[in-house]
Image (cartoon, rainbow, N blue to C red):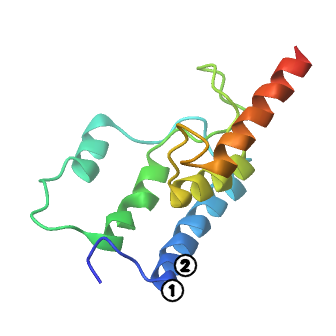
Amino acid sequence: MSRLELSPLHFRLIANRAVDLCAGLLESLDTAPSFPATSGEATTALFDTPLPEQGLGASALDALRDVIAHSRPPSPRFYGYVLGSGEPVAAVGDLVASVLNQNNTAWRSSPAGITVERTVVRWIAEAI
């Protein structure tokens, strides 16, 4: 198996790790500050690293906790920008879409994807 491939078990392990981090973020939203306690120097020290000579594999996800800690939380108390709502169910949908990795250019490339897209466009037209 190449370094780019993951066994189903290994995928479950790293996906569960990421889900646990995301669930922790969602659990903390009620008390999280609207802005991260960080600075340019702190984020540079954490993330401005040399280009690795070899792939990192699953260890590429080791910095996710720091990414979350140094990001503005998606809290309803933040009014600085007009952002779409980040619905957790949509994040799960994004995960599935990313794993499916469909080419939605034509029905023959992604029968389900194109049919769902056409249905949603029809729903929007009906609503309008």
Q: The residue under label 1 is which amino acid type?
A: Leu
Residue positioned 82% across, 23% down in the render: 124
Residue 44 at x, y percent in the picture = 24, 43
For disc 1, the neighbor class at 10 Å (few under 14, some 14 to 19, many from 20) is few
Seen in the picture, residue 119 relative to 5 is either above or below; the reply is: above
Left or right relative to 51: residue 30: right
Residue 67 at x, y percent in the picture = 42, 51
For disc 2, the neighbor class at 10 Å (few under 14, some 14 to 19, many from 20) is few
Q: Which numbered disc covers residue 9? A: 1
Q: CA distance from mark 1 to mark 2?
A: 5 Å
Q: Nearer the viewer, residue 81 or 84?
A: 84
Label count reads 2
Q: Secondary structure at mark 1?
A: helix
Residue positioned 70% across, 36% down in the render: 117
- Asked where in the image residue 107 lies, by quadrant, the reply is top right
Seen in the picture, residue 9 relative to 114 is either above or below; the reply is: below
Q: Nearer the viewer, residue 2 or 70?
A: 2
Residue lying at the far right of the rendered structure = 126
Q: Marks 2 and 1: in contact by CB < 8 Å?
A: yes
Residue lying at the far top of the rendered structure = 128
Residue positioned 49% across, 52% down in the render: 68
Residue lying at the far front of the rendered structure = 108
Residue 103 at x, y percent in the picture = 50, 45
Q: Which numbered disc covers residue 12? A: 2
Q: Secondary structure at mark 2?
A: helix
Q: Nearer the viewer, residue 15 or 108?
A: 108
Residue positioned 70% across, 34% down in the render: 85
Q: The residue under label 2 is which amino acid type?
A: Arg
